[in-house]
């Protein structure tokens, strides 16, 4: 037990004291054992939970998850306070000074009438503050712990601000096509993925130029990719409610790929001279071919030896 008075409502100082007590000899064994490394993943997870609440515009979720972020800040700061390296006072003082320094148009005599001018001043002041004398210094300062696509976008953004940029999208699109060809060659060569000019290297080149195109188009690749993933997931989920999966032996495959749109099924009477058999809502309509979903999110027709038993079929 620790000496602590419970309250109906707590403040900032109470959070710091609670964190200190949890780490104290009479506190929580789990909290005392934690290090920066052991709760690193927790910090990241809490950050994503905040973003999820923001995306959902959920005020209750925002309040709770932002509190969890403050808890993480308090915990990591308490660890450093115990080592005598800095305190929460130092953290608050540092960020306050940063805000004042990087807003001279508010707290000083500099003028910035637009958001764009503010960002230009911010970047210049940041580089001065951190001693970044070149674009290479600025690029190296981009956190290596960022997701790779995000870091690539920030890197090309900094090089663009330094004047290393294409005048339009034609050349980067040509470069993208070139990288696709090289990736295809690497795949067809069939060597180890991590070999020189292998799939890993060529795929990295392709993703990097894609990040460049996103930056030049004003698109955040980290937002574009999840949106496309959601559309594909919606597509699969929709079809999976209606189409069962053929799990029996196959005699042969008909290679034709039939496109379909979200929210609908393409019902064909014949394909390449063969009858088509659909399993809709768990019912086998006719003997013949069964619809399954392929990796390209199209419909692939696979002919089976005999009419399957519905009990032997598994839905997505």
Image (tube, rainbow, N blue to C red):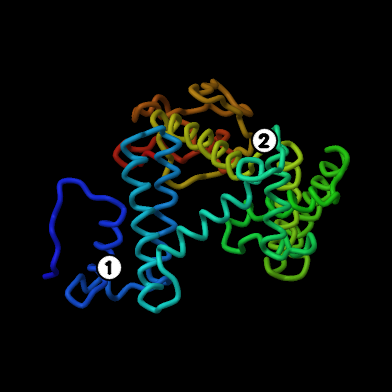
Is residue 17 positioned above or below 150 on the image? below
Label 1 crowding class (10 Å Cα cut-off): few <14, some 14-19, many 20+?
many
Q: Does the rendering let one see residue 261? A: yes
Q: Does the rendering let one see residue 313? A: no
On-image quarter of the N terminus:
bottom left
Asked if the residue under mark 1 is in contact with the one under mark 2, i.e. CB atoms within 8 Å, the reply is no
Residue found 41% across the figure and 73% down from its top: 80
Residue 277: percent from the left, percent from the top?
47, 28
Q: Secondary structure at mark 2?
A: helix
Residue 150: percent from the left, percent from the top?
62, 51
Q: Nearer the viewer, residue 223 or 125?
A: 125
Residue found 55% across the figure and 56% down from its top: 97
The answer to whether 35 appears left or right of 141 in the picture is left
| Residue that numbered label 1 is attached to | 20
Total numbered circles: 2
Residue 47: percent from the left, percent from the top?
43, 51
On-image quarter of the C terminus:
top left
Q: Nearer the viewer, residue 315 or 275?
A: 315
Measure the C-alpha gap from mark 2 to mark 1: 40 Å
Q: Nearer the viewer, residue 25 or 45?
A: 25
The answer to whether 4 appears left or right of 41 in the picture is left
Q: Quadrant of residue 274?
A: top right
* N-term mark: 2 or 1: 1
Tag shown at residue 103: none
Furthest-front residue in view? Answer: 109
Q: Secondary structure at mark 1?
A: helix
| Residue that numbered label 2 is attached to | 115
The answer to whether 95 appears left or right of 285 in the picture is right
Is residue 130 positioned above or below 114 on the image? below
Residue 205: percent from the left, percent from the top?
75, 56
Residue found 41% across the figure and 68% down from its top: 87
């Amino acid at each position: 037990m620790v000496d602590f008075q419970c309250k109906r409502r707590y403040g900032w100082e109470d959070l710091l004291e609670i964190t200190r007590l949890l780490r104290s000899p009479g506190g929580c064994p789990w909290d005392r054992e934690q290090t920066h490394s052991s709760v690193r993943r927790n910090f990241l997870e809490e950050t994503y939970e905040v973003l999820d609440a923001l995306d959902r515009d959920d005020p209750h979720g925002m309040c709770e998850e932002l509190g969890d972020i403050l808890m993480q800040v308090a915990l990591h700061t308490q660890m450093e306070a115990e080592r005598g390296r800095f305190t929460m006072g130092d953290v608050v003082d540092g960020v306050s000074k940063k805000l004042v320094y990087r807003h001279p148009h508010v707290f000083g005599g500099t003028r910035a009438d637009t958001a764009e001018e503010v960002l230009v001043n911010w970047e210049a002041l940041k580089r001065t503050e951190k001693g970044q004398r070149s674009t290479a210094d600025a690029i190296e300062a981009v956190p290596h712990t960022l997701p790779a696509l995000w870091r690539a976008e920030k890197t090309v953004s900094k090089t663009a601000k330094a004047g290393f940029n294409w005048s339009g999208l034609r050349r980067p699109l040509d470069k993208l096509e070139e990288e696709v060809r090289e990736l295809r060659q690497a795949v067809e060569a069939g060597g180890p993925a991590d070999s020189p000019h292998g799939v890993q290297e060529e795929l990295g080149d392709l993703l990097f130029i894609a990040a460049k195109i996103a930056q030049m188009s004003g698109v955040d690749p980290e937002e574009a990719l999840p949106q496309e993933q959601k559309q594909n997931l919606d597509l699969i989920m929709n079809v999976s409610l209606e189409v069962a999966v053929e799990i029996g032996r196959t005699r042969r495959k008909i290679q034709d790929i039939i496109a379909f749109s979200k929210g609908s099924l393409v019902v064909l009477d014949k394909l390449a001279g063969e009858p088509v058999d659909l399993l809709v809502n768990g019912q086998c309509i006719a003997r013949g071919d069964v619809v399954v979903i392929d990796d390209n999110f199209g419909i692939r027709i696979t002919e089976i030896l005999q009419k399957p038993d519905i009990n032997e079929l598994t839905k997505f």
